[in-house]
Amino acid sequence: MKEMMLNLNSLAMMLCTCDFHADIEVALTGEEWQDVERNLKIHGLNGPSSLFGLDSNELMNMLEISEYSAYKIVRRMKSTHLFLKKLREYEQQGIRIITKYDEDFPQVLIRKMKKNAPLYLFVAGQLPTDFEGISITGLQTVTKKEKGCVRRLVDKINDEDKWLISNDCKGVDQEAFYYGLHHHSKIICFVCENMYDKIEEYKKSIKSGRVVFLSAVDPIKRFTVTHAIDRNSYVCGLSKFQIVVSSKINSGATWFTIMHNMHHNWTTSLVLDNDCFGNQRLLEMKTTPLYLKNIISDMSFEKIYELNKKEDVEEVNIDQMSIFEFIGDANDSRI
């Protein structure tokens, strides 16, 4: 495992924003931290490391932040020794923490997601500094035909020497992860719970450099829907293409993530043209189709996209979608 090397800007950011389960002092929210960074830049200060040694009045006067934000920064700075102790504990368990001030933080997340990018990441494994990733998403139940498509897609990702980006969900994503694991794929798996268990279960693959686990929340914390939604958006941010194998209108995280991505343009969706009602609706919304003949062809994903993409696509206005689409398709019982 790569040795944890902290620079002062990263340390200051993590001290102020890392929301450890065991922390007593309240962390700054993402919005509060963005205000701090913006004002540091406006006043010509040398990054977050400039926060060290300042008291509440100095923080409020120099950065023009609220009294409560200044109070939280001071309180968090006073707990530096406890924070470093926690970092050491994670390091001993094979987990390190990186921020955008670290060279190995995925810059693609910052470029694509900007203020929506995670402030820090928990990492287990050898995270590449430069990579192209493709994610595969779909419903929790998978047909035999869809399994065949997923496996051929993973083979195609391997052939192009790209990374499979996983969101650690049951169904289509899990099928891709397990198949890739046994067919020498390079996998980045973004989790929002049970990171410790994943590290223990896949420690050989992590050690070999073929699997990397990421999380934007403390590995000790339990699952929440908010964390899952954030994780799905980060998977989009890490992916050059996201392939939609199956979907169901108004079907929880899968459908919500697709809609969210279409609004923010974090990645390009390639939607499998099949008899899945949700997929057909997405194709009507002018997403780029992916045909079976494309999957079995020797064409790269880039060439497939260039061949099939729609011209002059208007932005999707979710508010104007039919109410029946939000109710869902009664004939499609899959989750």
Image (cartoon, grey):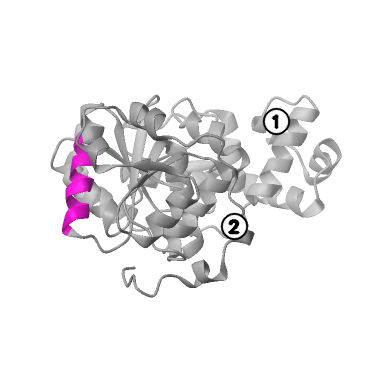
**Is residue 291 toward the left or the right of residue 46 in the image?**
left
Residue found at the far right of this picture: 61
Nearest to N terminus: mark 1 or mark 2: 1
Residue 145 coordinates in the image, percent (x, y):
18, 54
Distance between the alpha carbons at the discs numbered 1 and 2: 43 Å
Q: Measuring from the top left, give residue 252's x and y in whole percent.
A: 44, 65
Quarter holding the C terminus is bottom left
The residue carrying pointer 1 sits among few (fewer than 14), some (14 to 19) or many (20 or more) residues within 10 Å by Cα, namely few
Q: Nearer the viewer, residue 12 or 126?
A: 126
Locate residue 97, reporting x and y percent.
44, 40
Horizontal side, residue 35 vs residue 10: left or right: right
**Relative to 41, is 146 on the left or the right?**
left
Residue sitting nearer the eye, 211 or 273: 273
> Which of the two discs, 1 and 2, sits closer to the camera?
2
Please report the bounds of the magenta region as a residue range: 144-155
Residue sitting at x 65%, y 31%:
49
Q: What residue is rendered at 42% in x and 65% in y?
A: 251
Q: What amino acid does circle 2 point to?
A: Ile
From the image, tell me which residue sits under label 2: 318
